[in-house]
Each structure stands twice: as C-alpha cells, then as structure tokens.
C-alpha cells in the first residue's frame, strides 16, 4: 500500500490529505515525529514533509507535485496561472502570521512528544523568536490575519475566484485549518461556512490520525 508521511499541523501536508480524501484514495497514514530526521532523509534526501511513497517504494515530496501525481484523471480543476501566483503570494503573507499565532499552540497537541516539541521550538524560534514572545504578540498576529481574510472573503464566488471548487480552495483551507487549534480565534461566519464547505467537499478529517491506532 502507498504511504503518506506527514505532520498533522503542516499546511502542505493538509493539502495532500485533503486531496487524498477528495479522491477517496486508500493509503497508510504515517504521522512522523518532528525530530525524526532519518526517515525523510532516507526517503527523499531532505527533511521535509509531506512525502508520498507509492506501492513500488518510490518516494516524492513537494505537495503540489504529489497532488498532480495523485490526481491522474484531473478531477480537481485549477485556477489560471495569474490567479495562482496571486494566491501563492497571499498564502505566504497569511501563512507567516498563521504560523506565528498557532505554533505555540500546535506544540501542545498530541502530535508532539517532549523531544519533538523541544526540537520544533528550537528550530522555529531561530527565525520567529521565542514562543513566549510569539504568544505575547498573539493579538497583533490575529489582527493581521483578520485583515487578510477580508481580502480573501471578497473573492469568494462562492469558491475562491471561481464558481466551482478548485485546487485553490484546498490550498487556502489547508493554510487556515491550523487556526482551529488556537482557542480564542474565531473565523467570520462567511469564512467558517466556506471552510466547512471545503471539508464537506473533500471529506477531510484533521484529527483522524490521532484516532487511527
Ligand atoms: N514546498 C513544500 C513545503 C513543505 C514544508 O515546508 N514542510 C515543512 C512543514 S510545514 C517541513 O517539512 N519542515 C521540516 C523542518 O523544518 O524541519 C511543499 O509544498 O510540500
């Protein structure tokens, strides 16, 4: 059977999990500890997830390449190139604030053990500063996210820049899903309905790996 190696909180991994759920693929779900360097290095030569390993043992990374590989019958439409580029820029700005806000919470979910939590915090703090400081500034990150989401909401027609569900919706929802872990964060009614529509379309279940074994 094919295997998906992933981190539960990782937005790029969630893209692939949403795609797998949408395509109704059967696969082995393997959540890796964040401090496990040897498994990804052995599979692809880089410590980066998601990794998809097919039945023959061939492994690949890069979420969008994996999605293209899985969606052989082109069941998931894509937006035009220019819209995709705009979306990537928006996601990278939004993603930075989402990570700053959510990381101090993600590390306390059952995905992490003590050693992977310490590894994650040490690695991420190099770029973003200590998690204690991130947590102190959470109102600022939240304000930025809410501002950026307004731009996004104005492009829902009813899917992102489209009358039909596309890969862009998977990419957006995957980047936002981690915010559900932040206790006081609230999406607007419109965003919440949109995310629930993506969930219902894909049959994605964020917590399923925690209950799998
Ligand atoms: N461009 C890659 C990005 C994947 C990525 O950034 N994965 C992060 C987790 S969100 C990772 O594996 N980081 C490992 C590390 O920093 O140790 C994709 O789309 O798959």
Image (spheres, rainbow, N blue to C red):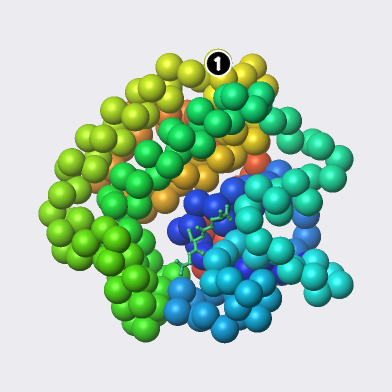
Residue 126 image-quadrant placement: bottom left
Left or right for 87, reference 202: left
Q: Residue at x 19, y 48 (%)?
A: 138
Residue 117, given in percent of the width and then of the height, sits at: 35, 75
Q: Which residue is mark 1?
A: 157
Task: Report the residue at 29% width, 61% height from top.
Answer: 127
Please state if 98 lies on the left or on the right of 211 as rendered: left
Q: Quadrant of the C terminus?
A: bottom right
Say which residue appears at 46% left-offset and 35% top-offset. Answer: 89
Label 1 element class: loop
The residue lying toward the viewer, choosing from 19 and 208, is 19
Against 11, residue 197 (above or below) is: above
Q: Is residue 58 above or below residue 195?
A: below
* Disc 1 residue: CB within 8 Å of ligand 1: no
Residue 180 in view: no
Res 74 → quadrant: top right
Q: Is residue 81 visible?
A: yes
Task: Look at the picture and state if 185 lies above or below 192.
Answer: below
Q: Position of residue 164 (x, y in %)?
A: 67, 22
Above or below, comparing residue 1 to residue 181 in the picture: below
């Amino acid at each position: 059977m094919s295997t998906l190696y992933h981190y539960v909180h990782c937005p790029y991994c969630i893209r692939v999990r949403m795609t797998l759920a949408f395509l109704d693929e059967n696969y082995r779900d393997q959540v890796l500890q964040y401090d496990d360097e040897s498994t990804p290095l052995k599979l692809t030569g880089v410590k980066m997830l998601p990794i998809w390993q097919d039945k023959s043992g061939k492994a690949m990374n890069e979420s969008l390449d994996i999605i293209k590989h899985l969606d052989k019958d082109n069941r998931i439409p894509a937006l035009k190139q220019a819209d995709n580029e705009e979306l990537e820029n928006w996601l990278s700005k939004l993603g930075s604030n989402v990570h700053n806000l959510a990381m101090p919470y993600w590390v306390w979910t059952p995905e992490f053990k003590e050693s992977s939590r310490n590894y994650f915090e040490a690695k991420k703090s190099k770029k973003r500063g200590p998690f204690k400081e991130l947590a102190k500034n959470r109102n600022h990150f939240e304000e930025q996210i809410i501002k950026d989401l307004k731009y996004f909401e104005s492009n829902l027609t009813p899917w992102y820049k489209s009358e039909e569900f596309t890969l862009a919706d998977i990419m957006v929802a995957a980047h936002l899903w981690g915010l559900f872990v932040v206790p006081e964060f609230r999406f607007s009614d419109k965003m919440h309905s949109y995310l629930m529509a993506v969930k219902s379309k894909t049959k994605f279940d964020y917590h399923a790996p925690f209950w799998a074994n």
